[in-house]
Every structure is written in C-alpha cells, then in structure tokens.
Amino acid sequence: MDVFDELLRGVRGRGAVFGRSVLCAPWSLRFTDGAYLTLCLPLRGAGWIVPEGGEPLRVEAGEAAVVRGPAPFVFTDDPAGGTGPGRADGVREVRWDQSRDSGGASDGVPEFDCATVLLAAAYDVQEQLPQRLLRALPPALVVPDEEDCSPLRDYLEGQLGRGRPGDQIVLDRLLDWMLVCTLRDWFDRPEANPPGWYGALGDEVAGPALRAMHEDPAHPWTTAELASRAGVSRTTLAKRFTELVGDGPVAYLTEWRMTLAADLLSHPELTVAAVARRVGYADAFGFSAAFKRVRGESPSAFRREALAAGPVDAAAPAG
C-alpha cells in the first residue's frame, strides 16, 4: 500500500456529515462543532474562509478549501464585516451534530438569485495514522482545481436531495475523493510545509528504507538491513535519513510502530500483548516500556482514554 494511501485510509465521511447551503448576500456561516477537518466546496459563486485568529482566504467555484479544527471558522461574503453583530441577517451557526443544513434561499428569495452555493463536509478524524499527516496542515488552505473537476461538482450538486437508494454512501465517497485529491494537491504545492518523511519518500536513499518500514513495521529491521534496501552503507543511510526526516531509522521505526499501536489499542478485542506482537514486539513488557517512552503514558491508560472518547469506526487491521 502507498504510504499516502495508508495514512488517509481512515479519513471517511460517514453519514449526515455534509450540508448544502444556498447563500444570498449578505451571509455568514459560522462552523462551531469542532470537527477535525472541514472541506468547503463552492459549487457556484465564492466566499471567504476566516479561521479564528487567522487571515481570510478567498475560495471560488472550482477551488477547494480545507479548514483544520477544532477552532471555529466563518465562511462569509464579507471578510471585513462578515462576523460582526452589524450584519443585517446575523451569523448563522452550523453544527454537524444538528440536522443537516439543507440550505435553501431565505426570505423567499429564488435560488437562482443567490450567488453562492456551498457544499461542506466535516470529518471527525479519531485515528492516529491520518493525524500524523494532517497535523502538518495550516489552519486553512485553498487549492485551485487544476484537474478540471467541474463535471464532478455538477454531479454532486445534482445528487443532493434526490432521495435515491444509496445516495448517502455515494455522496460520502465522492466527498472523500475530493478531500484526498485536495490534500494530495496541497502537499505538492510550493507553499506547503509537509513533514520531513513526506519529502523523503522520493529520495533514492531514504525512500526505500521508509517504504520497507511502512510495508512491514513488525519486521525486526536493523539499520544495516534497511541500508541494503537502498544499496548504501549504514553510515550513508543514517546520515541521509536523519537529514531528511529528523530522526534516525530506528527512532523513526519506533515512533511509527507506536502510532500503529495507538490505533490498535482503540479496539478492545485486542489484548495489549496482541497489539505488541502486531507492531513487532515479542512481549507486552518491552512494548509497554517503548509506548510509554514515546507517547508519555502506558498502553492501558491510553486505551482507557481512547475508549472513553468513543469507538474508532474502523475494523482492526488483519495480521
């Protein structure tokens, strides 16, 4: 599995997480539910994303915006006055735990007289794997549509509210596709600041070692074995890997294993010993010591907190 695919496989829209709003000026939507990520797609018109404490970002039809939570943000037609109390129609609160916002033109104004149609989707990312990548995102970002996805946007708008069997899962998956494409395009842009390991994947020395560790994290990798994958000496691998990633190969492998373990611990059917074996430890004692050193708490304490926060809606990986 590609590393990018692996990290984003748990980022899924799951029912009643999107809304469509038909917006007639003046308008402001304040998103206050604390979602980990929110995807904003203007299907028509344009608006401004105003992150809490951040600079406004213009987003137009044909572009996609991603806002990283949990801080609130505003989508408005007027970034200077769009959040103030002087607005004629006030600021409309948007919460995904309430009924889906079907939008609709207000005050009897026909939809075709309203300049902006917004489709937004919220993602509550509980898994540790995608957070490893998503923590590198800025509070808000805008990516232009350089692949001409306008037919997909038209299809999305046409499918909303039709009530056909399977509509929910179709829309969820299409929005997932849009989110992943937007994130992939963002990390390829010069203004992005991806984590060191992301850029190292394409390096001829560090890349083969990284991919080997991700393909089989439970294998008892040594620096010498990883260096052989790249066809270089141990010294060359260690130096190049540390320059690009910030940690040596063994330290990176330990941290990666603990990230995998954190997600596995959210599945109560797996014992701590079973989790230990899945991430390359022969016994629970050695695993627990490594987990506490990296994560700052024991596996049992982490599991209690994870289960109290609610179950992760994903099956435990096989193996």
Image: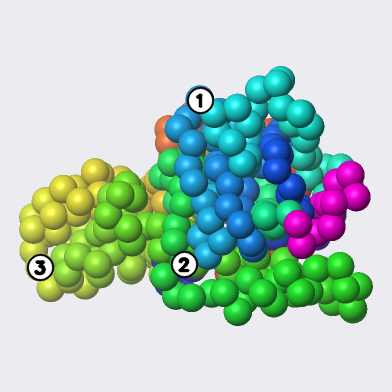
Q: In the image, what residue type sits under mark 3? A: Val
Q: Which mark is residue 95?
A: none
Residue 256: x %, y % from top left: 42, 51
Task: Identify the element where label 3 is drawn.
Answer: loop
The segment highlighted magenta reads 103-113
From what the image shows, is residue 251 above or below residue 189? Answer: above
Q: Residue at x 57, y 74 (%)?
A: 150
List x then y, in percent, for residue 187: 37, 57
Magenta run includes residue 94: no
Visible in this render: residue 89? yes
**Dot 2: few (<14), some (14–19), or many (≥20) neighbours within 10 Å?**
some
Q: Which residue is the extreme one toward the top?
A: 85
Res 145 label:
2
Taking the image as shown, residue 205 lies to the left or right of residue 290, namely left
Query: Where in the figure is residue 257, as x and y percent of width and height?
Result: 45, 52
Q: Is residue 309 visible?
A: no
- Check disc 1 and give the amino acid type: Gly
- Which residue type does callout 2 highlight? Asp
Q: Nearer the viewer, residue 281 or 22?
A: 22
* Helix, strand or loop status at disc 2: loop
Inter-mark Cα distance, 3 to 1:
47 Å
Question: On residue 232, which mark appears?
Answer: 3
Quadrant of the rendering where the C terminus is positioned: bottom right
Residue 53 disc label: 1
Q: Position of residue 272 (x, y in %)?
A: 62, 47
- In this rendered view, identify the residue nearer to me: 167 or 293: 167
In what element is the residue under mark 1?
loop
